[in-house]
């Protein structure tokens, strides 16, 4: 994720000493205002305290910088729910998650300045231990693609994290072992890409001859005075001793979240920082580079480099544009199990905010909480309110945009693809050139339906709000997330259709599991059945039992979204293995059922109703397993 910088390290140290002496626990002088007043500090106090209470998050830390100064820094709640230690914005460490990618972008640009990396060059020019596969001949992945999320790698995430500090596998070894498929040509679509960011960090360590964590410490952290930040695994003892613990709501209390470590440190695995340290990085980026980047390189970091739709905000280098209150923001969200941060810069105002939480919150609301803080910050500095359109300015036909759209971040290779069953977006056309969307376009988990009015053909604004969406060549883009696009699905890939097909096709095997034993007992009284018929029924019952059991296991897996995040990223939940294993066995027994169904008709096993039931059971099992396979819920070896 990202970091901030101060005017000078000396000024920061002086301010810190003053705050400690005053007993403010790291709160800058601007934060001492009465929380009931109309100041930014008062508004932040009220918002974050309310978030912790309403969303059930143990603690948070916030820092605000303006014109090269830290004007607000405050800790809220506790760093560890089991111990009650209070959060200190200068001393309590939080895992950065993807905010660390800003360091990666800075490191790459430093090597570009030295002439060791060329943004337009094929990454294979610099790799030594492995090569990126040539999936699109003549269209190599470039260094620039890695910084714009346009490399085209599949989003494969299962099992990439670790519970404890990673010391056995190097970054390069992990990238070589876990290279995902290239699912789209480079340079065409921005789609959030952890592998690409990790690869960018590996290029830095390859051309510099220095492991990434050591390079960042020497070339970024020390020059900026960020002595409470570390990419090393394990962390230095002093930093580790003050590290917050990640949490998720569990009953009336909080459970500890694991999965913050791993080999991919350029993406945030294992990287930790404090709110005050992130203030130093923000100040550096807002003041022309702060000595770690030349002004031209720093400008390119903050400049729009790519966008999925020219009518909407786009991307800088691993930073995302957003527009709030008529002004441009550059943001970076960061999320790991138990930790969620949000960095937002207003370059024209030379101001920035960073907030981080040590809890997921109910229904994963900490992700939304960070955006709420960024929006409050932008609104405070905004010169005017954002657009609040109520009716369409263009009445051009909108029916052509109706349909279902799937995120480009949807994996094509692991079972996280199943999220597309409920995570896709449905667009429906309404009167007066309006649209309604259902699905996760908003970061607010309470908002599942949004209404849009047409600004001009293909461009829509949220009714009464500031968000915008745009359509182009069958793709939906959204202003609040420049690092993803939504691709239109053909009718036969409709998630709603698939949901109903799964329900109906599961009903037959589930009922069979319950009723078949009763039917068998009744049939025994009317005469002995052929051995083949008895075996066929056993195979049918076993298939139904396997499909029912796999569904129960899947429901248990996804019952708690926060726990699911940990299970996916660690890849160590028995259910992650059991679900595809059960369906794989069911696939084998269903193949046997096809043979049995044919024999049942040829040899006239059972009555007509019995043969029809068995045929329906076989077809239902095939439909169910076919859909499971399409969502990577069948293990095929």
Image (cartoon, rainbow, N blue to C red):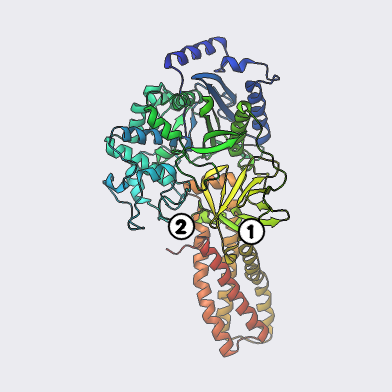
- What is the number of the mark on residue 402? 1
Q: Position of residue 543 (x, y in %)?
A: 56, 70
User: Which residue is located at x 49 percent, y 54 percent?
Assistant: 411
Considering the numbered disc 2 on the image, is that residue within a helix, a strand or a loop?
A: loop
Q: Position of residue 575 (x, y in %)?
A: 53, 54
- What is the number of the mark on residue 622? none
Mark 2, other Cα within 10 Å: few <14 / some 14–19 / many ≥20:
some
462 sits to left or right of 492: right
User: Which residue is located at x 59 percent, y 78 percent?
Assistant: 537
- What is the number of the mark on residue 413? 2
- Please indicate, yes or no, whether residue 311 appears anywhere in the rendered image: yes
- In this view, the residue in front, 325 or 183, is 325
- Please indicate, yes or no, whether residue 168 appears anywhere in the rendered image: no
Using the image, determine if residue 238 lies above or below residue 549: above
Using the image, determine if residue 1 lies above or below residue 133: above
Distance CA(mark 2)–CA(mark 1): 28 Å
Residue at the extreme bottom: 603
User: Which residue is located at x 69 percent, y 42 percent?
Assistant: 389
Considering the numbered disc 1 on the image, is that residue within a helix, a strand or a loop?
A: loop
- On-image quarter of the C terminus: bottom left
- In this view, the residue in front, 317 or 371, is 317
15 sits to left or right of 518: left
Q: Quadrant of residue 162?
A: top left
- In this view, the residue in front, 175 or 40, is 40
Q: Quadrant of residue 8?
A: top left
């Amino acid at each position: 994720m990202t970091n901030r910088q101060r005017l000078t390290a000396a000024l920061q140290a002086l301010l810190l000493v003053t705050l400690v002496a005053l007993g403010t626990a790291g709160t800058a002088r601007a934060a001492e205002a009465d929380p009931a007043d109309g100041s930014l500090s008062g508004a932040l106090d009220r918002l974050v305290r309310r978030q912790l209470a309403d969303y059930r998050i143990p603690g948070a830390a916030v820092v605000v910088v303006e014109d090269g100064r830290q004007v607000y820094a405050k800790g809220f709640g506790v760093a560890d729910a089991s111990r009650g230690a209070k959060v200190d914005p200068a001393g309590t460490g939080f895992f950065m998650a993807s905010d660390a990618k800003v360091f990666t972008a800075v490191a790459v640009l430093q090597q570009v300045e030295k002439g060791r990396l060329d943004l337009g060059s094929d990454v294979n020019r610099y790799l030594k231990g492995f090569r990126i596969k040539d999936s699109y001949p003549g269209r190599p992945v470039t260094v620039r693609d890695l910084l714009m999320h346009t490399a085209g790698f599949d989003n494969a995430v299962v099992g990439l994290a670790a519970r404890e500090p990673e010391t056995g596998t190097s970054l390069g070894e992990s990238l070589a072992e876990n290279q995902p498929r290239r699912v789209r040509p480079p340079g065409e679509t921005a789609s959030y890409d952890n592998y690409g960011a990790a690869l960018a960090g590996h290029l830095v360590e390859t051309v510099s001859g220095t492991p990434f964590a050591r390079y960042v410490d020497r070339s970024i952290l020390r020059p900026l005075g960020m002595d409470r930040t570390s990419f090393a695994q394990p962390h230095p003892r002093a930093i580790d001793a003050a590290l917050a613990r990640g949490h998720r709501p569990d009953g009336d209390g909080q459970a500890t979240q694991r999965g913050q470590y791993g080999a991919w440190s350029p993406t945030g695995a294992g990287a930790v920082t404090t709110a005050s340290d992130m203030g130093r990085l923000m100040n550096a980026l807002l003041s022309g580079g702060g000595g770690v980047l030349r002004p031209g390189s720093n400008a390119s970091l903050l400049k729009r480099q790519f966008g999925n739709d020219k009518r909407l905000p786009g991307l800088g280098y691993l930073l995302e544009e957003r527009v709030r209150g008529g002004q441009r923001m550059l943001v970076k969200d960061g999320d790991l199990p138990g930790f969620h941060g949000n960095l937002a810069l207003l370059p024209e105002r030379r101001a920035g905010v960073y907030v981080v939480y040590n809890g997921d919150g109910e229904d994963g609301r900490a992700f939304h909480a960070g955006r709420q803080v960024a929006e409050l910050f932008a609104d405070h500095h905004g010169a005017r309110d954002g657009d609040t359109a109520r009716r369409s300015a263009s009445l051009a036909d909108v029916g052509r945009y109706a349909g279902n759209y799937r995120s480009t971040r949807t994996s094509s290779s692991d079972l996280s693809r199943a999220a597309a069953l409920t995570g896709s977006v449905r667009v429906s056309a309404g009167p007066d050139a309006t649209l309604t969307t259902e699905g996760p376009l908003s970061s607010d988990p309470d908002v599942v339906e949004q209404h849009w009015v047409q600004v001009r053909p293909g461009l829509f604004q949220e009714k009464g709000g500031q968000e915008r969406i745009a359509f182009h060549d069958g793709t939906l883009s959204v202003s609040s997330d420049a690092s993803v696009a939504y691709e239109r699905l053909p009718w036969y890939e409709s998630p709603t259709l698939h949901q109903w097909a799964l329900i109906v096709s599961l009903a037959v095997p589930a009922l069979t599991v319950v009723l078949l034993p009763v039917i068998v007992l009744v049939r025994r009284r009317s005469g002995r059945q052929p051995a083949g018929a008895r075996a066929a029924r056993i195979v049918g019952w076993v298939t139904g039992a396997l499909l029912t059991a796999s569904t129960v296991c899947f429901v248990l897996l996804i019952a708690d979204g926060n726990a699911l995040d940990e299970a996916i990223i660690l890849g160590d939940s028995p259910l992650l293995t059991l679900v595809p294993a059960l369906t794989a066995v069911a696939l084998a027994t269903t193949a046997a059922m096809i043979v049995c169904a044919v024999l049942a008709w040829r040899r006239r096993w059972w009555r007509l109703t019995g043969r029809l039931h068995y045929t329906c059971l076989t077809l239902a099992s095939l439909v169910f397993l076919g859909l499971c396979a399409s969502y990577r819920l069948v293990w095929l070896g």
